[in-house]
Amino acid sequence: MVSGLVSRSLSRVREMVANATGRNGEPTEKQLDRIRRQLRECAESRGGEVSTRLRAARLADTYLKLDDAGRQAFLRIIALEFGPDPQRVAKAHDAYQAAVGTPRQWDAEAQMRAAMRSSRIRILTQFNAIPQGVKFLVDLRADLLRYLEHDKELKALDRELEARLTAWFDVGFLELQRLTWNSPAALLEKIVQYEAVHAIQSWKDLKNRLGSDRRCYAFFHPRMPLEPLIFVEVALLQDLADNVQKLLDENAPVADAERANTAIFYSISATQEGLRGVSFGNFLLKRVVDDLQRDFPRLQTFATLSPIPGLVRWASRNPKDVMAAFSEADWKRLATAGIDGPESPRLAQILAGNPEWATDPALVRALRDPLLRATAAYLLEAKRDKEPLDPVARFHLGNGARVERLNWLADTSEKGLGQAWGVMVNYLYDPERIVDNVGAFVEEGRIDAAAGVKRLARR
């Protein structure tokens, strides 16, 4: 009965919106007033379950029918007109200050907390009552984050929504699933769509990534059962991987997973932009390691083959740091390969990510050492607010990994050459060092790195 009422309500709302919106979906003043009334009804939480679902359904349908400008206006109304009442907050604060040290203190504290709770929270929570309501809020925050870049007045709404989503997507509520070739087709299509590190080229490519020597795990929320929140792809090998093209080769022989001693995490993709700031990637890796150790007792090494997405961008902004990685011997070798000194236009193109040089064997040999040195310096020394500048490095080092090895021409795709001169890095997760590494990283900003990587950075 409730679902029928909601469906009829949505039909009426669609007709209302079609008649009330301006051209191109922009809201008219009449519709904005109607939205305000709907929001006030939600904030007042009138009626029971049926009324709650109907109100939330009307609001959701209204929002989805608006264009970008209309949605931003909708969110601005919530952000600016449904916050805490300043006078009520001030009164509660004064009462609390007067009650400190008396038996009334705890009641006054509760009253102050209630005064700080904005109507925005009551409005957002009611979307949970409708089908796909959680997914609706995740997508709504994705919109909000786009508008926030140019509309800072939405910040308060974003803080509250992020806090709600962080609570609703606590790792204790998430379900870890292994995805296989026999998983539902709709789910496999989502994996193809959301893969953010190494694009899946075909169904054959996907099937290869789900083969017997591979694993794919994802976190799911019970209210979004066919929407992976984050997923990791794993290769089971007998050594550290040093080339992603070889790793993803569909025609390569299938490895014997039972003999594998190394698990390589070669792709980690977060799928929901609206969950930015809600962290569960580290919990995913820990759960996956536990699953792999249970299924494959021979596994001893857990590492990544990771991209370095910020390297070329950093090099373009810090040319002196890059040039410091070139020795006199390097310049002599480069001269024989057609690059005459630091001012060479061809060198500038290479450092900017032009991929054509990778087919020239002489340049490949001459550039290897200096570019690996520059890469090591970038990973170990380039910082932002005392944390690594590179986003992938921040993630893995913040979870206790070590910079284990740099791999030359490990990704010769146009993307790999364009963002990091084809260099990739192995981050190693050593169970005996993870806790110490996390503590040193958080407290001191200290990065654990293998001796070979440190030597490259020093040189």
Image: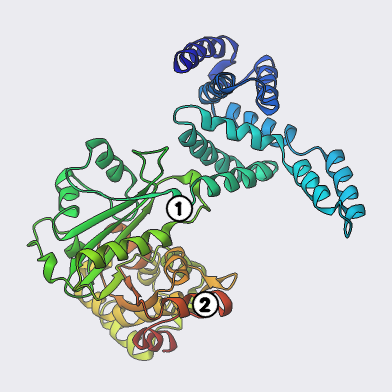
Left or right of 376, for residue 415: left
Q: Which mark is residue 53?
A: none
Residue 112: give x, y in percent of width and height: 80, 46
- Please state which of residues 98 and 209 is positioned toward the viewer in this rendering: 98
Q: Determine whether 134 is above or below 257 in the image.
A: above
Mark 1 neighbour density, 10 Å: few (under 14) some (14–19) many (20 or more): few
Q: Is residue 380 visible?
A: yes
Left or right of 47, for residue 180: left
Residue 171: give x, y in percent of width and height: 45, 53
Q: Determine whether 448 is above or below 176 in the image.
A: below
- Please state which of residues 311 and 338 is positioned toward the viewer in this rendering: 311
- At 38% from the left and 77% from the top, the residue drawn is 403
Q: Residue furthest front?
A: 103
Q: Secondary structure at mark 2?
A: helix
Residue 410: give x, y in percent of width and height: 25, 69
Q: Amino acid at mark 1?
A: Gly
Quarter-wise, where is residue 186 in the image?
top left
Left or right of 259, for residue 385: right
- Please state which of residues 359 and 176 is positioned toward the viewer in this rendering: 176
Q: Determine whether 129 is above or below 408 in the image.
A: above
Q: Secondary structure at mark 1?
A: helix
Q: Amino acid at mark 2?
A: Gly
**Mark before the other along the chain sequence, 1 or 2:** 1
Q: Label 2: which residue? A: 439
Q: Nearer the viewer, mark 1 or mark 2?
A: 1
Residue 114: give x, y in percent of width and height: 75, 42
Q: Label 1: which residue? A: 172
- At 88% from the left and 57% from the top, the residue drawn is 100
Q: CA distance from mark 1 to mark 2?
A: 23 Å
